[in-house]
Amino acid sequence: MTATGPGDDRAARDPQRPVRLLRAEHDKLLPILHRTPEAAFGNPTACPGWSVRDVLAHCGAALTRAATGRLHAFTPELNELDVTQRRDWPLPRLLSELERGYLDAGPAIAGAGGRLDAIALGEWIHGGDVRDALGEPLAYESDGFEDACALLAERARRREVPLVEVSLPGDTLRLGVPVPGRPPATLVTGRATLMRLFAGRPAGPDGYQLSGAAPGELVVF
């Protein structure tokens, strides 16, 4: 992983990055889901009011919309409607839509010039939500982490997150944009907690040291 920051040409968009990220979820998360007992799909997740099944329904719906061009604004209300429409689907149908979506949405997102890259990042984050709820390892730091970091850097720029200099074990990142008259914030943490913080997921205070910014300022979704 390389450090990226404002004006750094290493941050130039790689159109295959969302394809790789979705393929990583296809290859790694789906086998977990296929061996998971159906009752566990009712486990609560970090997404308020949503079970594992609900998160996966949202993921499948978003990927289908990206693949077919039938996008909506992805507001909480519209996302909830997508989930509600799938609540009576048999689990195999839900997983089938998700499986197709991981493969079909990648090229559409790649060809959108960056406009839809946040969908790929969001899918990967939701994969962390699911792993976390199922007690699986590598929640929020699974395969594709480096590509997720690159998409996170772009998302943080677009959302104008105040510049944060991040120290990870063995690596550094610069996320966000400079704020005139305000020095960069500093964050010392691990890979999973980095994603939790920027995705607005619960993160124990013992897992990071943040100076110069409040956790709520980092959230990109």
Image: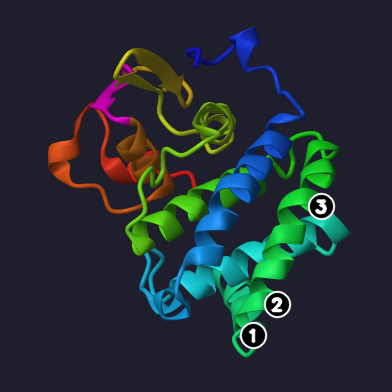
The image quarter containing residue 96 is bottom right
Compared to residue 146, the image places residue 110 above or below, namely below
**Is there a contact, CB below 8 Å, between mark 2 and mark 1?**
yes
Compared to residue 158, the image places residue 1 above or below, namely above
Separation of disc 3 and disc 2 at Cα?
16 Å
Compared to residue 15, the image places residue 79 above or below, namely below
Residue at the far front: name it.
35
Q: Residues within 10 Å of mark 2 (few under 14, many from 20)?
A: few
Q: Secondary structure at mark 1?
A: loop
Task: Name the residue that disc number 2 marks.
Answer: 93
**Residue at the spot 59% in from the left edge and 32% down from the top edge:** 151
Compared to residue 94, the image places residue 7 above or below, namely above
Of residues 84 and 95, the one nearer the viewer is 95
Q: Secondary structure at mark 3?
A: helix
The tag earlier along the polypeptide, 3 or 2, is 2
Where residue 103 appears, x then y in whole percent? 77, 50
Of circles 3 and 1, the one toward us is 1
Q: Amino acid at mark 3?
A: Asp
Separation of disc 2 and disc 1 at Cα?
5 Å
**Residue at the spot 25% in from the left edge and 47% down from the top edge:** 203
Magenta range is 183-190
Task: Name the residue that disc number 1 marks.
Answer: 90
Task: Name the residue that disc number 3 marks.
Answer: 104
